Image (cartoon, rainbow, N blue to C red):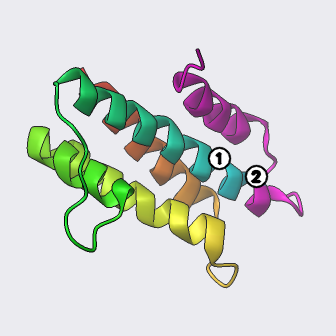
Amino acid sequence: MFNWNDYLKIANDILMMTDPNSIDAEAYYRCGISRAYYSVYNKSEQFIKSKHLTVIPQKKESFQQAVIRILGGLNGQAGVDLSRLKDYRTDSDYYCHIKIDINTFKLSLQLATSIDRQLI
C-alpha cells in the first residue's frame, strides 16, 4: 500500500535539491507544493475515516471541500491549514501568472508539516 508520507518526503527533498537560481526552480516548487498538499490531504481523509466518519459533500461542495470541512470540525487549525495549503496547490497547478517562489514553497511545506503533526 502506498505511504502518503512519501509525498511529503519528496516535497522536502525538492526543497533541499533545488537551486533557487536555476531557470526551472519555479517548476520544482510548484511540483513540491502539489505533492505536499496531496500527502496531507490523503492523510486527512484517512484520519477522518479512522474516526468512523464518512465524507459526504454538502450541496455544491466538492469532495475535497468536504474533507477540509470535516477535518476542521475535528481539529480547527488543521482544517484552516489544509484550506490554505489547498489554495497554494491550486495556484501552483493552474495559474501560471502567479509567481511561486521559494518563500511560498517553504510556507506550504510548513503548513503540510503542521497538518501532518496534528493528524494523530
| Residue 112: x %, y % from top left | 42, 41
Q: CA distance from mark 2 to mark 1?
A: 6 Å
> At 77% from the left edge and 60% from the top edge, which residue is drawn?
27
Could you tell me which secondary element the residue under label 1 belongs to? helix
Amino acid carrying label 1: it is Gly
Image quadrant for the C terminus?
top left
Residue contact between numbered discs 2 and 1, judged by CB atoms under 8 Å:
yes
Q: Residue furthest top?
A: 1
Whether residue 100 can be seen here: no
> At 61% from the left edge and 80% from the top edge, which residue is drawn?
98
Range of the magenta residues?
1-27
Residue at the spot of label 1:
32
| Residue 101: x %, y % from top left | 64, 64
Judge whether 56 appears above or below 100 on screen: above
Judge whether 99 appears above or below 75 on screen: below
Amino acid carrying label 2: it is Tyr
Q: Left or right of 17: which side holds 116?
A: left
> How would you rate the neighbour count of disc 2 (Cα within 10 Å): few for under 14, some for 14-19, many for 20 or more?
many
Q: Is residue 57 magenta?
A: no
Between residues 32 and 65, which one lies in front from this camera angle?
A: 65
Q: Is residue 10 magenta?
A: yes
Image quadrant for the N terminus?
top right
> How would you rate the neighbour count of disc 1 (Cα within 10 Å): few for under 14, some for 14-19, many for 20 or more?
many
The numbered disc on residue 28 is: 2
| Residue 116: x %, y % from top left | 36, 30
